[in-house]
Amino acid sequence: MNKQKSRILAHSHPAIERLRRHRWIAAGLGGTTLLGMVAAFALAPPGDEGAVQLQTVLEQLSTPTTTLAITDSPTFLHEEAIQRSDTVSSLTARLGITDQDAQDFMRSDSKTQSIARQLRPGKIVTATTGMSGELITLYFPLNGKDSMLVVERHGASFVSNEQVLRLETQTVIKSGEIRSSLFGATDAAGIPDAIAIQLAEIFGADTDFNRDLRKGDRFSLVYETLTYRGQPVRTGRILSAELINDQKLLSAYWFLTQDGKGGYYTADGNPLRKAFLRSPLEFSRVTSGFASARLHPVLQTWRAHKGIDYGAPTGTRVRSVADGTVVSAGRQGGYGNLIVIRHQGTYSTAYGHLSGFAAGIHQGSHVSQGETIAYVGQTGLATGPHLHYEFRVNNQQINPQTLALPTSIPLEASQLSRFKVATGPLRAQLELAKQVKLATVE
């Protein structure tokens, strides 16, 4: 075969001479692939097929020696998401832990016993094990905390301790379209409920999310999410948002003033936080409006209804519509459990038929706008769970849905220039969010 190969390569045909002027590319294959054989193909230029004989030359190559570097104690990294049906045993099995000593420790240790109560679906758990499945380290993020439980092997024993997570902040851009409800649209867009609630709170002074949303309304969001090892741990705050409600554009930008106070402002620098919210409930429906006369559902007599009734399940959080001081909190006739709060100037609000009061709510306590003060109930003269809400001016009930509520003070000129610079990137991100395909809910 070698003599034949020499005759082929020594052939003096012009085509061969041209091939000699071309660069050859050699490829080596290591290991025992293709039965240890390597094939080389030489092709003549077009037009010379009849003058040059093509031949396949096969050579037997020796198998290279392969050496594996094995450490004394190799470890394996496992990462698993908790499933809805998981137990501690099924989770550790998928993590490759077959260590009975580790299992016994996790059942007896007071800290690791909490793992069974915190198996939240989707949470990422990480473990390192040895070749025989022995546990070396387990990392378990804790619910509601920026920390994780760490279980470590120390020789033949184990220790557990809580460590603070080094969270990273990421910016998320999303958009959506209202088809049925705000939560329906945010669920379809993959937006957490905590962010949806923030959105309702931000625009709550201008939009009643119980009554004002329309099919086809749109929103765009830029918000923070805190991650650990690339996995989301919790959401942060909304940085900027736009809402098109009934063809009216509302915008919000988070801005930190020089005195360290943060808040949301319109594109023109006007604060979105009005003196009063439009509704004391985040989400509900009006079951009875303000009226000069209506048939009382319990007394069956015609009388004025000088408030707004919001239907909601028992236990729904009731929030104060503005900063103020609690005038009274207790039982009062047909109102049942009632809270009255005095606000700035001549304004006050009342909240009735409550199932209970929030911790710390009593006469003389100070409350902030949006703070939970009580819970929806059915106390007093009520046929079903709902909130009776009154807005009062000089102790006279006024329809809050028709009243021009007081506004807040806009940014000063010096702060306004800082605001425009700080919100420039947020405006660009909102424009990008608008280009994202809108999520819809049918």
Image (tube, rainbow, N blue to C red):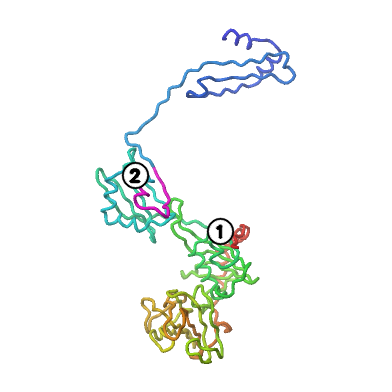
- Whether residue 411 is visible to the viewer of this picture, yes or no, is no
The amino acid type, in three-letter code, at marker 2 is Ile
Which residues make up the magenta segment? 77-92
Q: Is residue 90 magenta?
A: yes
Q: Quadrant of residue 203?
A: bottom right
Task: Say which residue appears at 39% left-offset and 29% top-offset.
Answer: 68
Q: Position of residue 374 (x, y in %)?
A: 41, 77
Q: Position of residue 41 (x, y in %)?
A: 62, 19
Quadrant position of residue 209:
bottom right
Helix, strand or loop under label 1: strand
Q: Residue furthest top?
A: 3
Q: Position of residue 128 (x, y in %)?
A: 36, 44
Can you give x and y, in whole percent of width and height, for residue 235 in the image? 47, 61
Compute the Cα span from label 2 to label 1. Answer: 38 Å
Question: Mark 2 sits on what residue?
Answer: 97
**Residue occupied by mark 1:** 173
Q: Is residue 360 above or below residue 119?
A: below
Counting residues from the start of the chain, the first of labels 2 and 1 encountered is 2
Magenta segment includes 83: yes
Which quadrant is home to the N terminus? top right
State which quarter of the image contains the C terminus: bottom right
Please state which amino acid type lies under the numbered disc 1: Ile
Q: Secondary structure at mark 2?
A: loop
- Which numbered disc covers residue 424? none
408 or 156, nearer to the observer = 156
Q: Residue furthest left?
A: 156
